[in-house]
Amino acid sequence: MSKPVKLRSLNDSRKYGVAAKDVKELLKKGCGLFQMPLVGCRVCLYEDGTEVTAEYFPTLPDHVDLLLLSGGQTWSGFVDDIDRLLSPDRYSQGLVEAARGLLSSEESPNRRRLLSELLLHLEDNSEMESREEDGDWFQGVDARFKTKSSYMKYNCEGRIRGYMKEVDSVARTIQEAKVKTEFMKTAESLMAMLKSAQYNGCYFNRTEKETNRLCTQEGWFTCQGAFDQEACKSLHSINPYGNRESRIVFSTWNLDHRIEKKRTVIPALLDAVQNHRSSDINLNYFYCLLFTRDNLKLVHIVCHKKGAHNLVCDKRKIYKQTTSTDKGKKTVRGKRLRVS
C-alpha cells in the first residue's frame, strides 16, 4: 500500500504530494519531479534532518514533510531554515515577498506579529546613508537633515536636552531667592558642560568612534537590560538606520536612568544647593548621573521598569573633595567619577 508524503528539495521552494510504497520508489519519483540524478540521492525528515531508510519508511505518518537531497547536500532541520533567514544577501528578497504574502492573509495575531517583525528586519537599507539614497527613510524628517547619522545624532541630543529642561524647571518651584539663584548658577554650569559635549548626541551616531557610540558601525543597537540587570535576557536589538519603520519604533526605546532622575538625582542636587554654595558641589558627578552612560542604559520598552529603582546617590561624591593644610582647608576639584 502506498504512503502519501509531502516532498520538497533543497533548491526548490515548491512542495509536492507524492505516494510511494517504499523509499526506492519515493526516490525515483522525487528525482523525476525535481530533475535530479538518482545516484547519491536520499530522503530525510524536513523537521530535523533524520534520514529515511527502508526500515524507517513504513513508520512515517501520512503526509509528513520530507526533503530530497542530492549527493553532497546536508540538512539539519529547522536550524538550517533559521540559517537561511540569517543570510539576507541570498534570500532576503524572496523572504520579503513571501512574508508579505503570508501577512496579507494571516489572521492569527501572534503569527502576524512575527511576520511583521520579520519584515521589519529583512527590509534593511542600513548600508545607505544619504537622503538621496534612501528617501523613504527620511519621510517625516525635516529637510535640513541630509544623512541618517545627522538625524540620529539630533534625536539623541533632543533626549538629553529634555533632561536638562527638567533640571531648569525645578528653579521655578524654589521660593527662597538665594537658593534659587544658586540653583540657577548650577543649572547654567551643567548646560555649559552639555554644550561642550555637544549634548552627547554621539551615542546614537554610527559614524562616531566605537567608544563614543551605543551602536555598531552598521547601526545596530542592543538593549542593555533593565536597570537592575547586567544584560537584556530577551536579546532585544534594532537597527533604526535600516528602514523608516525601525526608525519610528526606536523612538519607543528608552535611555533609562539607573539612579532615577526625577525621584533621586534632581532632588539630591536641589538639596545640595540648599545646604551649600553652588561652587562647593561636585557638578561633574551630577553631570554624569544626568547625562552620560555612567548612569544611562538604553533599553527596549519591555525592559523599562517604571517602578522605583531604590538606588541612591553616593553622598561621598556630591561635594568637591577637600584636603586640610596648615593654612586651613582648601577645595580640590574632583576628577570625573563613575557612578558606584
Image: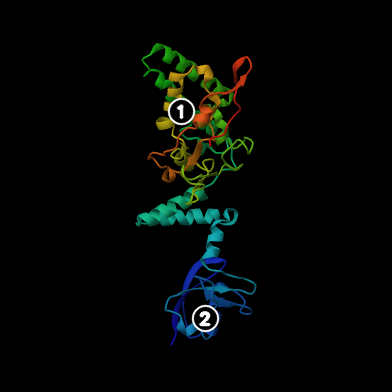
Q: Which residue was labeled with disc 2?
A: 26
- Frontmost of labels 2 and 1 is 1
Q: Residue furthest top?
A: 177
Amino acid, disc 2: Leu
Residue for badge 1: 163
Q: Quadrant of residue 260?
A: top left
Chain-order first, disc 2 or disc 1: 2
Which x, y percent locates residue 280? 53, 19
Mark 2: give few (<14), some (14-19) or many (20+) Cα within 10 Å: many
Residue at the outermost bottom position: 1
Q: CA distance from mark 2 to mark 1?
A: 68 Å
Examine the rendering and report whether any part of residue 265 can be seen.
yes
Res. 188 visible in picture: no
Determine which of the numbered discs, if any, sits on residue 88 in the image: none
Q: Nearer the viewer, residue 209 or 10?
A: 209
Between 242 and 197, which is closer to the camera in this rendering? 197
Residue plotted at (49% across, 19% down)? 186
